[in-house]
Image (cartoon, grey):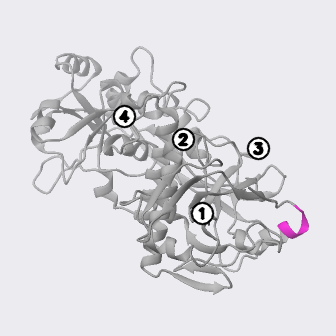
Amino acid sequence: MEVWYCANLSELNSTIEALPPGLLYRGQTKEYLREDGGPNLRSSIERHGCVPDRMLKWWQYSRFILGTFVKYFDLESDLATDQAILQHYGWRSFFLDATSSPKVASWFAGHKYKSKTAMELVEDCWEDPVFAIREEAWYEPAGQQDACMYVIGKKGLRRNNIEAVDLVEIATEAGSHRCSAQSAFMVGPLNGNLPDDCIIAKIFAPTSVFREYASQGASLTQEDLFPPLSSDPFLAALSSVPWVKKYIGEEKLGIDFFERGLGLPEYNVRSMKRNGPEVCFYRRFWIADTLAADSVFSETTFYLSGEALFHGAAGSLTEFPKISELLKNVTSLALELDGLIAYPYARGGSFAKGIYLERQENGSILLTELVLDQHGLRPAEFGITRGLYYMPNEEGTWEHISHPEECDCGHEAHHKHHLVVASHFENSLANAEFTEVRDRIFASDGVVATSDPVVIDLMQQVDMVRSKV
């Protein structure tokens, strides 16, 4: 491993120009060392740990986004591209960030990350006030110190069976996302430190010299490397995830506090004083608490669960003995989530709130989605969408069958995910995770099974809820 020190811009230019093509770079405002003196280059998951539920939610939205915006995206799971959005938009991954651009690496070597929690009093589309809590983030010129740029060789990575995935693979048809703007590569997955023999050289220079290098030609800015949501479709989709009420003590403040349902650092922050109808502020409520006697769901048995049951992958997507057995005794089941799911391809204000299963006269089962329209703070219509039909055998194995009223949207991944959620539901039933809390209403452990009274009062005051099929 070569080590070079560049005291000025001329020396840094000469050093980088002498390097062979095809290398990767990683810039840091300082070098971190292991106890044995080697470079301490580990994945963000290893540095900060994993929070499973949050990780699964990020992963799920990453899959939704890639499948929506990336042309010819292969829906089969690929760890590097799946985790690209996690790594670059505010969560953690099993990979290390790198770039093919020494200019980008120099910018990061010369700038220090900063963040703070900010709160703003804003209005929803109905002019109802809420406090919005956000994580504001920015980069500022680092203090005068020696920064470090690592030069990583692809041959060394291959020798250690480590991937270097060029995120040009997830280029979008329109707009510019963060991975593209940063000429990003994902190096990994890593189990421990990046092996020392993957690092060709370390280049040290004062932070000011790295900033000079990054400003040559077309000067890089924070907005160049972190495009705003007006031009970044990935960021726009992540920002559309509903805000979630933060429950604090006895709730006597009068105005509720909300934080993003998918917390992410926000760069180039602007005031969100007034919000359009596509911005949703979710308070906990259960459709099961709002049903009229003549509702199409009046005979449905509801199972209330945390949002985590919606996210992640599953093993078998055909074996559902517990669900099949339940549907021999009741006509319909709804797995309702404490939360709203925002698909990037859905119209604004329309969200998933779980899945719905209904036994048909011929013994087949309809599997579809429980949906809700909500604008701002106010829930509106709810119901189900068209779904797919399955025929169970005696052992509870399902086979897809054609049906004249099945959904013909052609969105295979969307309907496949309903089976994933049904599989999670099946496992929860097998593990006896639900307890009956009211007539025909069961709740899983840890779920608050009562609705926020403010939402129920709002629904009772205004006739906004319609069950629709």
| Quadrant assignment, res 3 | top left
CA distance for labels 1 and 3: 45 Å
Quadrant holding the C terminus: bottom right
Instruction: Estimate the x, y position of residue 340 in percent, counting from the top left.
Output: 63, 58
- Asked if marks 4 and 1 touch (Cβ < 8 Å), the reply is no
Callout 1 crowding tier (Cα within 10 Å): few <14, some 14–19, many ≥20: few
Dot 4 or dot 1: first in sequence order is 4
Up-down relation of residue 249 to residue 205 (above or below): below
Quickly name the residue at label 2: 411
Helix, strand or loop status at disc 1 = loop
Q: Is residue 461 magenta?
A: yes
Dot 3 or dot 4: first in sequence order is 4
Identity of the amino acid at label 3?
Gly
Up-down relation of residue 439 to residue 130 (above or below): below
Give me the residue at 68% from left, 63% from top.
257
Quickly name the residue at label 3: 276
Instruction: Estimate the x, y position of residue 26 in percent, counting from the top left.
Output: 28, 35
- Camera-near label (1 vs 3) is 1
- Camera-near label (1 vs 2) is 1
Identify the mark at residue 110; answer none if there is no mark. 4
Identity of the amino acid at label 2?
His
Q: Evaluate whether residue 223 shows in this view.
A: yes
